[in-house]
C-alpha cells in the first residue's frame, strides 16, 4: 500500500520554508542555506553538465571579457577583436562561435587572463577559419583552458611568433622572412615569453649609381643595418646592433609595412645625366639610407666632381687640376653602429685618369691616388639566412688608362668600374651594375662613348628572423 503526504511547505524548526511549492515553482532551501548532495549520491536534471548559456540577445562586435558559463556569437564583419577569458577556476567554461562566417577575413583572438595558459601554452589563440567555433574548459594551472571542441593547430596556445610575409624559410628553430620588394610582415600571434618576441633583422638600402661623364666615381653602397636577437643563433656581421636599445625590435601582433629600396641609376655621357642615389629601406623604426651616387669628371662643370652622401658615400670623379674632388660622406644620417663609410677622394695633380671607389659597409672607397685602383669599399657578411651572404659593397670608379685594369667593386655586390684597355675613348667600357638585393653600388664609366653608361646600384633587401618553436 502506497502512502501519500500532501503539503505545500516544509519548514525548519525556526519556521523558515526549506521546501516551498508555489504555482508549480518548487524552491529548495531557505535564504542563506547551502543545498548539497550526500556523499556518494548523484543528481540529474539540474546543474551545469558541460554546456553554456548562449547569449543570443547580445551579439559581440568588439573586444569584451567573457563570463564563465556563457557562450557568445562573435561578429567580426567590421574587423577583428579580442575575447578576454575570465580568471580560470576548475570547471569554468566559455564558448565562442563565428556569427556570420567572417573569421577567415577578420579573425577572433582569444586571450587568457594574466599568465594563465591555453592548452598548456602561453599566449593567445587565433580563430581564423570561416564558421569556426570553440569551447574551452578550465582544468588547472598546468594545462589552463583546454579546448574540448575544435582543437585545430591554430587554436593551440602559441608560445612563439606566428607571422606571414615575404619568402619564408626555416633554419633550426627559426623562421626567416626575406623581402626583395615591398611587402608586409604581418604578425598574427606573439609569444607569452617576452624574449621570444624580439626579432633579428638585416635591412639594406639600394646602392647608389655610378657618376656621369668619364672617369666617374663608383656609387656608394646602400646603408646596412643588422641586429641579432639572443634567441636566434647565427653568425652576425661586425655591425650587429645588439645590445643597443634603439636597434632592438620587439614585435606585437600587428602588420609591419616593409620598404625595400631600389638602386640608383647610373650616370650617362654628360653631366646633366649625373645618376641618382639609391632609395631607403625600412622595417619598423629601422631605416637604412640609400647609397650616394658617384661623382663626375667633366671639365666644363668641375663643381660636379664630389660623390654624394648616403648610407655609404659615392666616390669622387677623376682628377681635374687644380680642383680636389671629394668622396661623399657615409653614415648619413648618422646611426650607431655606422651604416656605411665614405666614398674615396679624387686627385688634383692632373696625372691620374680614374674615378674613386664608392664606400662600402665596412671599408671606405679607394681614393684616386698613385698606386690605387679606385676600387669599391668592402661590404659585410651575415648568416641571417642560414649561410653567409655579403652585402653593401661599394662600386669601383671608372678608369681611363691603358695601364690599369678595371677597378673592382667591393665584396658585397659592388659593380666594377669601366676601363679603356688601349687608352682610347672609343673602346672604353661602362661600369657594371651592383648586384640585386645586396645594396651594392654601381661602377663608374670610363670613357665618353654614348653607348656606355655607369652601372646602376643594386636593390636592397629586408630579412627578418625569429624563433618559431
Image: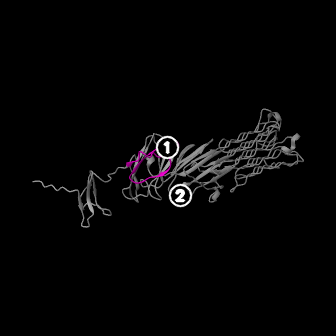
Q: Position of residue 240 (x, y in %)?
A: 64, 56
Cβ atoms at labels 2 and 1 below 8 Å apart: no
Task: Please tell me whether the stretch drawn in magenta is mainly helix, strand or loop.
Answer: loop
Q: Position of residue 1 (x, y in %)?
A: 9, 54
Q: Position of residue 69 (x, y in %)?
A: 38, 52
Q: Is residue 55 above or below residue 426?
A: below
Q: Is residue 422 above or below residue 245?
A: above
Q: Where is mark 1, residue-wise?
A: 76
Q: Earlier in the sequence, mark 2 or mark 1?
A: 1
Alpha carbons under labels 2 and 1: distance apart: 28 Å
Q: Where is mark 2, residue-wise?
A: 194
Q: Secondary structure at mark 2?
A: helix
Q: Is there any visible trace of residue 40 in the rendered image?
A: no
Which dot marks residue 225?
none
State the residue in front, 77 or 389: 77
Q: Secondary structure at mark 1?
A: loop
Q: Is there any visible trace of residue 310 in the rendered image?
A: yes
Magenta span contains residue 118: no
Judged by depth in the image, the label closer to the viewer, 2 or 1, is 1
Magenta stretch: give its range.
Answer: 53-78
Seen as rendered, the residue at the extreme bottom is 14
State the residue in front, 260 or 341: 260
Amino acid at each position: 500500500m502506497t502512502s501519500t503526504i500532501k503539503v505545500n511547505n516544509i519548514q525548519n524548526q525556526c519556521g523558515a520554508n526549506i521546501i516551498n511549492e508555489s504555482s508549480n515553482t518548487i524552491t529548495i532551501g531557505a535564504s542563506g542555506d547551502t543545498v548539497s548532495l550526500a556523499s556518494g549520491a548523484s543528481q540529474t536534471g539540474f546543474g551545469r553538465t558541460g554546456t553554456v548559456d548562449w547569449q543570443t540577445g547580445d551579439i559581440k562586435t568588439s573586444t569584451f571579457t567573457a563570463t564563465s558559463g556563457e557562450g557568445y556569437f562573435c561578429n567580426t564583419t567590421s574587423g577583428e577583436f579580442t575575447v578576454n577569458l575570465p580568471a580560470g577556476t576548475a570547471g569554468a567554461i566559455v564558448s565562442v562561435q563565428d556569427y556570420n562566417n567572417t573569421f577567415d577575413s577578420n579573425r577572433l583572438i582569444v586571450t587568457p587572463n594574466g599568465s594563465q595558459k591555453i592548452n598548456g601554452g602561453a599566449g593567445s589563440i587565433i580563430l581564423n577559419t570561416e564558421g569556426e567555433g570553440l569551447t574551452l574548459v578550465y582544468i588547472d594551472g598546468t594545462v589552463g583552458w583546454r579546448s574540448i571542441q575544435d582543437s585545430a593547430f591554430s587554436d593551440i596556445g602559441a608560445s612563439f611568433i606566428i607571422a606571414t610575409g615575404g619568402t619564408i624559410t626555416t633554419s633550426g628553430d627559426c623562421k626567416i622572412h626575406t623581402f626583395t620588394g615591398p611587402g608586409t610582415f604581418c604578425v598574427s600571434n606573439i609569444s607569452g615569453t617576452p624574449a621570444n618576441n624580439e626579432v633579428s633583422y638585416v635591412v639594406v638600402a639600394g646602392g647608389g649609381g655610378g657618376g656621369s661623364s668619364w672617369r666617374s666615381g663608383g656609387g656608394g653602397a646602400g646603408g646596412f643595418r643588422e641586429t641579432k636577437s639572443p634567441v636566434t643563433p647565427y653568425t652576425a656581421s661586425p655591425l650587429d646592433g645588439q645590445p643597443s636599445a634603439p636597434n632592438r625590435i620587439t614585435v606585437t601582433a600587428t602588420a609591419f609595412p616593409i620598404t625595400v629600396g631600389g638602386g640608383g641609376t647610373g650616370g650617362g655621357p654628360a653631366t646633366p645625366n649625373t645618376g641618382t642615389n639609391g632609395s631607403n629601406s625600412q622595417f619598423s623604426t629601422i631605416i637604412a639610407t640609400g647609397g650616394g651616387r658617384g661623382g663626375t669628371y667633366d671639365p666644363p662643370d668641375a663643381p660636379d666632381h664630389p660623390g654624394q652622401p648616403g648610407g655609404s658615400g659615392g666616390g669622387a670623379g677623376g682628377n681635374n687640376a687644380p680642383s680636389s674632388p671629394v668622396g661623399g660622406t657615409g653614415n648619413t644620417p648618422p646611426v650607431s653602429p655606422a651604416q656605411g663609410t665614405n666614398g674615396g677622394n679624387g686627385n688634383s695633380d692632373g696625372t691620374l685618369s680614374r674615378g674613386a671607389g664608392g664606400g662600402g659597409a665596412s671599408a671606405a672607397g679607394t681614393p684616386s691616388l698613385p698606386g690605387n685602383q679606385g676600387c669599391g669599399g668592402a661590404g659585410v657578411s651575415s648568416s641571417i639566412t642560414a649561410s653567409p651572404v655579403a652585402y653593401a659593397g661599394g662600386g669601383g670608379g671608372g678608369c681611363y688608362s691603358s695601364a690599369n685594369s678595371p677597378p673592382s667593386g667591393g665584396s658585397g655586390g659592388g659593380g666594377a668600374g669601366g676601363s679603356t684597355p688601349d687608352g682610347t675613348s672609343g673602346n672604353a667600357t661602362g661600369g657594371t651594375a651592383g648586384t640585386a638585393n645586396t645594396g651594392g653600388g654601381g661602377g663608374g664609366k670610363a670613357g665618353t662613348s654614348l653607348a656606355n653608361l655607369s652601372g646602376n646600384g643594386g636593390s636592397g633587401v629586408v630579412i627578418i628572423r625569429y624563433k618559431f618553436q
